[in-house]
């Protein structure tokens, strides 16, 4: 495994070759692949798209819901390269993978929503190479996200998620070969300081050979403005195992909410003979902080309006698609949104690049979901049941897994201007001393890792009440997932729901936390085209009534600084009597067509345009 999670770029010194396409594919129900030598090549296979989520491509239920080991294989031709380093990058393998190249195990990775990169220089050969990947999608209480596995009478396995979205699996993002110089940029980080007329850009660049650098190398960084002119340029100074320096940009055009200004950045590594490596990126100059009950972008308050989302689309499953992303951003812009949370896992790199270009704010979430021992935690939440979780002997392994994935998420996403906060959990059990001890470790590590020191947060479910929650003091702003009017006092009791909602917010207010609150989930399952007068549950009229009630409440509490409704679009879940073809809480259908509540939100969010000014 290499230390670089930089997005692959093609420059004068770097190449990338896509391995996307149709790969050989085979289920391994007996988990006999390793003992039978499947890493040498698959027999009796079928063909499967990479990237892709295999579940929705099948017409057979057993295959759609397959849980266990499964294998991929492809061949690629490697051109002759001299004195170059060859890396193999997987955008994601869900949930864990073991990689073989030319029958040699070259690495493995745990965690299904972040990239990993393997150095294959010593194994790859000029000409034809065979790449085989063993994948496993089982859930457990040490995996992220959490869940369990049921063994059926026929020996097959069924995933039992502790979370309410479908367990899409496979090689779900692109696979690429990267051809780089031996000496290359491995990572960089930027931290911004703003004054009235200039921005200071503090830079730190790490090279792949930093420890063996004899001092003959130089590292130059330049920032180019929107007109193609050099805004700042600097030769960095070597310090320990990195190159550091501070650039000054006069009269900077700041990246801002729905008003993005991006600069082109170039990092060049050189010696006395010339440029050895060049890495380029798009950057936005902005700051983010929390002061009192305000969330500040460039020192000015912002009110978050938008969604919890999922990477989810018909047939594609969780596979990234540029057209889907484009449509999603157009829908969000249309109804006045400015923010979304990557519920409940880090998304594909390209989502963040889109947000950088569009000026959207992102709360970036690690896959710490399902940390409540229930396969229906969306029902358990708020019912008062104590769903113990952090007292079990498997917790140390889970903690190490989460720490690893927090590190990978921050390493990958730390330079995106769109990322304004990291969310380190969604709806865990937080009422025990053990939960506080667990998450204290996670938050402490995240604060060490993020060079920009963004706010850290997490989403609390109903059992995490102001009287019982042990973990809210860890949060820089507090996120609440609440379903008053749906899971709690729904339908004809919606008037009671409003009273209960106000009662809880009054109790939070009485704590005098001095922190901003953001509603990160609230919504109702709604079947598009289902109408009733008066509005009844599952109808579009009821969804509208529900949001109008919730907005009445939110507007009466000045410490509420954001509303991210659940969900942007209908999405797939496991089967169940609570779900009609998936979760239907979308403001848009799964095909990205609006329900009538989309117009309710549009009117409200356009009226709230100036709330933060």
Image: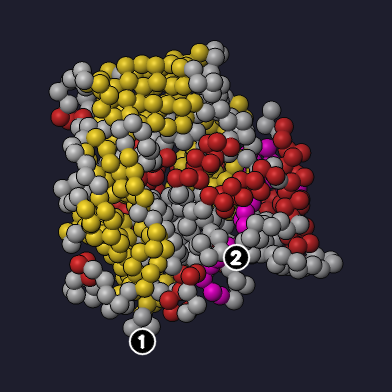
Toward the viewer: 257 or 483? 257
Which picture quadrant has residue 209?
top left
Query: In the rendering, which numbered label is found on residue 583?
Result: 2
Mark 1 crowdedness (10 Å alpha carbons): few <14, some 14-19, many ≥20? few
Quadrant the C terminus occupies: top right
Is 505 within the magenta? Answer: no
Q: What's the residue at 46%, 31% (across, down)?
A: 282
Q: Which residues are magenta?
A: 551-576
Residue 508 position by quadrant = top right
Total numbered circles: 2
> Residue 88 appears at what percent x and percent y?
28, 49
- Image location (x, y in percent) of residue 497: 71, 59
Looking at the picture, does residue 354 appear above or below residue 379?
A: above
Please state which of residues 330 and 457 is positioned toward the viewer in this rendering: 330
Q: Which residue is mark 1?
A: 154
Q: Which secondary structure lies at badge 1?
A: loop
**Residue occupying image coordinates x 76% and y 51%:** 599
Residue 281, compared with residue 354, is above or below; it is above
The quadrant holding residue 181 is top left
Residue occupying the far right of the picture: 533
Q: Is residue 568 visible?
A: yes
């Amino acid at each position: 495994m290499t230390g670089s999670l930089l997005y692959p770029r093609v420059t004068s010194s770097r190449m990338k070759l896509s391995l996307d396409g149709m790969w050989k594919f085979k289920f391994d129900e007996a988990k006999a692949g390793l003992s039978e030598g499947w890493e040498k090549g698959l027999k009796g296979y079928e063909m499967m798209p990479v990237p892709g989520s295999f579940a929705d491509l099948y017409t057979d239920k057993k295959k759609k819901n397959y849980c266990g080991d499964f294998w991929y294989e492809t061949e690629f031709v490697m051109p002759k390269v001299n004195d170059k380093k060859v890396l193999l990058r997987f955008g994601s393998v869900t949930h864990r993978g073991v990689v073989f190249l030319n029958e040699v195990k070259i690495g493995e990775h745990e965690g299904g929503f972040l990239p990993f990169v393997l150095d294959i220089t010593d194994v790859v050969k000029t000409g034809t190479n065979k790449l085989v990947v063993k994948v496993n999608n089982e859930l457990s209480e040490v995996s992220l996200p959490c869940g369990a596995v049921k063994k059926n009478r026929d020996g097959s396995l069924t995933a039992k998620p502790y979370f309410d979205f479908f367990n899409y699996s496979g090689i779900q993002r692109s696979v690429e070969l990267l051809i780089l110089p031996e000496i290359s940029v491995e990572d960089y980080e930027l931290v911004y300081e703003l004054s009235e007329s200039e921005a200071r850009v503090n830079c730190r660049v790490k090279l792949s050979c930093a420890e063996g650098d004899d001092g003959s190398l130089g590292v130059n960084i330049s920032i180019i403005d929107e007109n193609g002119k050099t805004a700042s340029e600097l030769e960095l100074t070597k310090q320990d195992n990195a190159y550091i320096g501070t650039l000054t940009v006069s009269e900077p055009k700041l990246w801002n909410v729905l008003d993005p200004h991006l600069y082109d950045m170039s990092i060049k590594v050189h010696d006395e003979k010339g440029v050895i490596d060049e890495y380029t990126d798009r950057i936005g100059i902005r700051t983010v902080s929390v002061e009192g009950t305000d969330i500040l972008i460039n020192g000015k308050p912002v009110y978050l309006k938008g969604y919890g989302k999922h990477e989810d689309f018909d047939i594609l499953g969780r596979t990234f698609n540029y057209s889907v992303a484009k449509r999603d951003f157009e829908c969000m812009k249309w109804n006045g949104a400015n923010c979304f949370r990557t519920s409940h896992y880090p998304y594909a790199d390209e989502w963040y690049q889109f947000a950088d270009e569009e000026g959207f704010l992102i709360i970036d979430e690690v896959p710490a979901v399902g940390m409540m021992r229930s396969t229906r935690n969306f029902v358990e939440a708020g019912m008062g049941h104590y769903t113990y979780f952090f007292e079990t002997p498997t917790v140390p392994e889970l903690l190490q897994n989460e720490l690893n994935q927090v590190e990978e998420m921050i390493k990958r996403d730390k330079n995106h201007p769109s990322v304004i906060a990291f969310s380190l959990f969604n709806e865990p059990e937080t009422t025990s001393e053990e939960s506080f001890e667990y998450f204290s470790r996670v938050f402490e590590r995240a604060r060490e890792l993020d060079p920009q020191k963004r706010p850290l947060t997490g989403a609390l479910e109903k059992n995490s009440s102001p009287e019982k929650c042990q973990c809210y003091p860890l949060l820089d702003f507090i996120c609440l997932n609440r379903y008053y009017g749906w899971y709690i006092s729904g339908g004809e009791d919606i008037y009671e729901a409003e009273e209960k909602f106000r009662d809880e917010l009054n109790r939070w207010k009485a704590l005098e936390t001095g922190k901003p609150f953001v509603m990160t989930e609230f919504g109702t399952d709604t079947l598009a085209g289902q109408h009733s007068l008066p509005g009844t549950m599952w109808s579009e009229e009821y969804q509208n009534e529900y949001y109008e009630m919730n907005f009445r409440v939110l507007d009466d509490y000045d410490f509420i600084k954001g509303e991210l409704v659940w969900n942007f679009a209908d999405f797939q879940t496991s089967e169940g009597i609570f779900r009609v073809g998936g979760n239907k809480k979308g403001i848009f259908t799964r095909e990205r067509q609006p329900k009538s509540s989309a117009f309710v939100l549009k009117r409200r969010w356009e009226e709230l345009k100036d709330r933060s000014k």
